[in-house]
Amino acid sequence: MNLRPLPALLLALLVPLGAFAGDERIAYTCDNNSRIDISFSADISGRPSAQLHFADEAIVLPQVPAASGALYRSGEIRLATKGDDAIFEDGKGNLRRCSRGSVAPVMPQAAAQPATSSFIDIAGSVSYRARIALPANAILKIRIQSGRRTLADQRYELNGAQVPIPFSATVDRDLMGKKASATVSARIEAGGKLLFASAKPAPATKNGQPVPVNIVLTPAVRATSR
């Protein structure tokens, strides 16, 4: 997986590496053959946090509640850890799967996830039937929910890309409740205006396992009219 340069949102979280010089760094090797050094500590109030070290700087992510493992988050930037495994999302739709040590993790098969993992991948595509090209500043927003609980919110700057537009997200199955079900809704905006939206959420799981999601959006006028 080729990752783009760190987005502007990350720059606000960057701190001098010397601030964490006393923390033990743990090396994680990722599925794109890159490496991330992570150290774990607590701030002055005692709140746990994770520091992701890149070159001579680090990203600080405070810990937030999680049903399984540990989750560190700031905005759309997330780090989920469980045992020796870690998943890092940079807030721009890029994701790294990492494992502690020098051995890169094996990419999961789309048809089946390991029974011992609480994380599942939800993926699919978004399209519409109208014969209209999207403007260069169009933005795709994806929301994955289980009942009223939001599992993931993603934002894709399309930069001229046209439908069908692929998307993917990793969510914690343990947050889905007893029925282990999830749905996906999508919308496309440009310049703050809604262009297309889901008529209704699309099922993303069956019997607790992810299924391909192909969402066909409707024009905003029809989607919002009553």
Image (cartoon, helix red, strand yellow):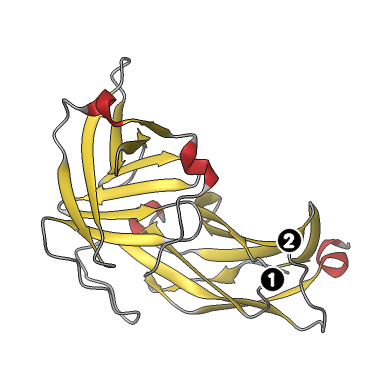
User: Which residue sits at x=21%, y=72%?
Assistant: 106
Residue tagged 1:
160
Dot 2: what SS?
loop
Q: For this rendering, which residue is in front, 39 or 225? A: 39
The three-letter amino acid code for the residue at tag 1 is Gly
Q: Is residue 197 left or right of residue 5?
A: right
Relative image position of residue 198 (x, y in whole percent): 70, 68
The three-letter amino acid code for the residue at tag 2 is Asn
Residue tagged 2:
137
Observer able to see residue 209:
yes
Q: Is residue 54 above or below residue 95?
A: above
User: Which residue sits at x=25%, y=49%?
Assistant: 81
Observer able to see residue 118:
no
Q: For this rendering, which residue is in front, 148 or 54? A: 54
Relative image position of residue 186 (x, y in whole percent): 64, 64
Report the number of discs. Answer: 2
User: Which residue sits at x=18%, y=58%?
Assistant: 99
Dot 2, how many residues are within 10 Å of its Cα: few (below 14), some (14-19), or many (20+)? some
Q: Which mark is residue 115?
A: none
